[in-house]
């Protein structure tokens, strides 16, 4: 019982310390300095699309509103009947002066449909500086200038961006946004605070064409579940740096049901487990309040653990308000508690299988990160 109590105290302590550090990491975020537009190169933005996602028009339109001298946007779909095609045609009519291209190609190159889409789009890419952004990402007018600027350093491999979930109305989407904004991204900011750059986010990856060719092109990640992470990893193996931009973009969160929410969060968690197994095993400390409560339980409610649980809960609220920056209704705190408990439960479940669902396809993930469709 003594060692169980000691273990409980240690667990509660690390949960408390982590939650405080996460709050500090989020509070310390800074905005990038202004960029001189005249010195920046021409850019091709690659936007793989699939379906009529939540606020798709608004997200894609934000890329057309960039204050940037020369840029091209290449959209890509697998099927000419995809509802996203109508959105692209609408933008082409509204912005006749922009170079907006659409690739329609069902060719499957590897198990990742997203990467296959990117490979099919590349023949239309005119420029040597590339920006890849998920379809549901919404950006500010100075986005391109800020993410492209670091690429002028030949020692930089990729530039990536943190992102913030923007939920559609409804509890499940709200919980999904809390998972992104108050667990996943703070975890990345904590890693960055301690000097790690072992990440890349599909919300934005900017790189030079020569760097992409040097790692074998998109074909090198055509079978990977975590294609964005692997892209960053391959460039770092070449001795190139990963830059975490100070730009934060928005991504749409559209969870229609509890089952959708669970499937999505399990995919995220099992993806992390695939690419960083040791990090995933210890990431339980990032679920601060549930972990501190577990430590309190193991220590049989010792005064020290009860105090640490209180401090952890206070730090968690501070993190919540640091992320939200606005006054919220009291019921929102209940959603935070529910999200943390659900996240901890799904983290445990993440150890049980390597199966994930991405859109309408279920995959079995091998230890090397490759994803194989399950019939």
Image: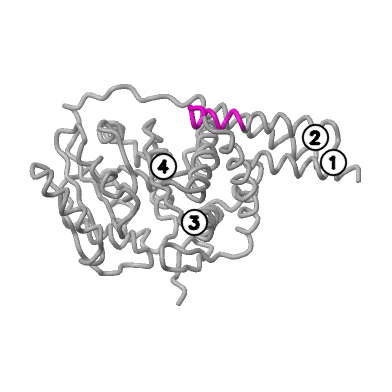
Q: Residue at x 33, y 22 (%)?
A: 33
Q: CA distance from mark 4 to mark 2?
A: 35 Å
Q: Disc 4 or 2, which lies upstream in sequence?
A: 4
Instruction: Indicate yes or no whether the magenta region holds residue 7.
Output: no
Label 4 and label 3: CA atoms lie apart by 15 Å
Q: Main secondary structure of the magenta part?
A: helix
- Marks 1, 4: nearer the viewer: 4
Element type at mark 4: strand
Q: Tell whether 182 sits left or right of 60.
A: right
Query: Label 1: which residue?
Result: 299
**Residue at the spot of label 2:** 305
Instruction: Evaluate if marks 4 and 3 touch, with contact meaning CB atoms under 8 Å apart.
Output: no
Taking the image as shown, residue 295 lies to the left or right of residue 329, namely: right
Badge 3 vs badge 2, beta-carbon distance below 8 Å? no
Q: Are marks 2 and 1 in contact (CB under 8 Å)?
A: yes
Frontmost residue, 23 versus 112: 23
For label 1, the SS is: loop
> Does residue 114 appear to the left or right of 277 in the view shown?
left
Asked which secondary structure carries label 3, the reply is helix
Check residue 264 in the rendering and tell me which mark sits there, or answer none.
3
Q: Earlier in the sequence, mark 3 or mark 2?
A: 3
């Amino acid at each position: 019982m003594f060692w169980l109590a000691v273990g409980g105290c240690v667990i509660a302590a690390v949960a408390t310390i982590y939650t405080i550090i996460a709050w500090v990491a989020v509070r310390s975020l800074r905005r990038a300095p202004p960029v001189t537009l005249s010195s920046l190169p021409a850019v091709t933005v690659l936007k793989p699309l699939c379906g009529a996602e939540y606020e798709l028009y608004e997200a894609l339109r934000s890329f057309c509103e960039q204050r940037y001298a020369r840029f091209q946007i290449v959209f890509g779909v697998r099927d000419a009947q995809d509802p996203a095609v109508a959105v692209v045609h609408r933008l082409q009519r509204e912005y006749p002066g922009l170079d907006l291209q659409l690739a329609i190609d069902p060719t499957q190159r590897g198990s990742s449909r997203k990467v296959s889409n990117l490979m099919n789009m590349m023949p239309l890419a005119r420029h040597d500086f590339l920006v890849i952004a998920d379809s549901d990402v919404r950006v500010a007018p100075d986005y391109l200038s800020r993410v492209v600027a670091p690429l002028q350093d030949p020692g930089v491999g990729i530039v990536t961006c943190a992102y913030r979930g923007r939920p559609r109305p409804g509890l499940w989407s709200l919980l999904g946004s809390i998972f992104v904004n108050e667990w996943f991204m703070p975890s990345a900011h904590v890693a960055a605070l301690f000097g790690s750059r072992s990440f890349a986010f599909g919300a934005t990856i900017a790189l030079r064409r020569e760097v992409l060719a040097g790692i074998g092109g998109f074909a090198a990640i055509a079978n990977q579940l975590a294609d964005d992470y692997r892209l960053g990893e391959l460039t770092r193996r070449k001795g190139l740096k990963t830059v975490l931009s100070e730009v934060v973009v928005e991504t749409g969160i559209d969870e229609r049901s509890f089952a959708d929410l669970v499937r999505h969060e399990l995919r995220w968690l099992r993806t992390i487990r695939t690419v960083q197994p040791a990090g995933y095993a210890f990431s339980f400390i990032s679920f601060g309040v549930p972990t501190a409560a577990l430590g309190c339980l193991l220590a049989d409610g010792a005064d020290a653990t009860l105090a640490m649980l209180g401090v952890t809960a206070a730090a968690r609220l501070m993190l919540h308000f640091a992320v939200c920056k606005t006054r919220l209704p009291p019921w929102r705190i209940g959603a935070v508690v529910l999200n943390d408990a659900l996240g901890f439960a799904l983290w445990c479940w993440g150890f049980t299988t390597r199966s994930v669902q991405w859109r309408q396809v279920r995959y079995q993930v091998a230890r090397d990160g490759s994803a194989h469709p399950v019939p």
